[in-house]
Structure formats: C-alpha cells, structure tokens
Image (cartoon, rainbow, N blue to C red):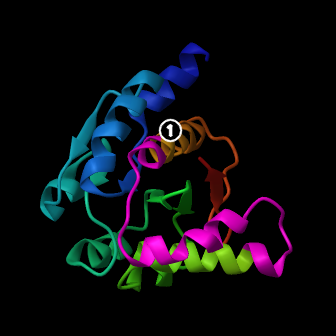
Amino acid sequence: MTNEERHLIKECRIMVIGTDTFVAYLKSELKSIGFSNIVVGNDTDYQKNSTTINIISKYGGNENSHFVSDIVSVPIIYTFDFVRGAGAIVIMPGDDKEVLAQTDLRLWAAEYMSEYCAFWNMEGCDWLGEALPEIKAGVTNESTQRLAAHICARIAANIAVGREVKHFPRFYLCRN
C-alpha cells in the first residue's frame, strides 16, 4: 500500500450498516487496514456532522434506514451474516436506495442474492438457498460475522483508494 493510499484511507468517509456483534469484528478489521477515525453509534445528528467512518449497529426497518436514505454523499456498505457464509451490498451515491426500505433487510438480501444466483445459474451459491430457513429464524454465526467484517473492510479500503467496487444491484457473496 502506498503512502497516498494510506492517506486516502485515513480521510475516507464511508457508512457501514451491520449488527451489534458485527461492529466489534469490523472495528478490528478496519484498524488493521489503516482506518483510524471510527465512530460507532446510532445518533443521527452525530453522524451527520462526522467526517469519519460511521457504523450504525442495526439495519433494516428502523429509523436509521430512513436516515441512511437521506445521505447521498457517502457510500454505504451493508454486510450480512448468512449463517453459512457472508454477503455485502454497496450503495453508492446516486444509486437507487429503495433497498433501504425493507423491513428485514438481512432476509431480503439473502432471498435477493439467492434468486439472482439461481436466475443466472451461478455455481457455488446453493448454500445460500439452503440457509434461508436459518436466516428466517434469526440464526447467526460468529465465524460468518468475522468473514463479513473482513469482506466489508476490504470493500471500504477499495472505495477509499478509488478502486472499482461492485454496487447494487450487484453484490458480494462468500461461503464460509
């Protein structure tokens, strides 16, 4: 990593949406890459004034989703523990934000990604469809939360240094 890339990472502002448990894993991953100003919280006034990485600890069907839909100037990364693997959706400024209105964003994302993979006959994605009953039941997995944090931190670094990233309707998906 060049000095310029390190500087870009330190100055980058990205919002990450995830669960409470996921936040602890993510903070560690972000620090290891070079992000230094990490704010964790749900206070929307605090987030609006922040010039750092923002992590909201809840996603889908709450007041933070409405706040997030108002932000148009920062990339937003949604990461998901899919029990047997992890996934991420990136919403860039200017992207359609209708996805944020889902009441159960984790379940919606799992179904969306599973159907996308089935439609395009993508190999190696069967595990996600098989995990849907567990996802519906609210089952989580510590190792896939760690995997999601790792994926998210790498996406954040790529955004920070200006590399191309997949963004909605495309997504990231990885089996544990």
In the image, residue 167 lies at what x, y percent?
63, 62
Can you say whether 102 is above or below 16 in the image?
below
Q: Is residue 116 left or right of residue 59?
A: right
Can you say whether 90 is above or below 147 in the image?
below
Q: Magenta residues, as a range?
A: 117-146
Magenta stretch encompasses residue 161: no
Which residue sits at x=37%, y=40%?
A: 26
In the image, residue 2 lies at what x, y percent?
61, 15
Say which of 167 and 49 sits in front.
167
In the image, residue 11 lies at what x, y percent?
40, 33
Q: Quadrant of the N terminus?
A: top right
Which residue sits at x=83%, y=62%?
A: 123
Q: Specify the amino acid type for callout 1.
A: His
Magenta stretch encompasses residue 119: yes
Chief SS of the magenta region: helix
Marker count (numbered): 1
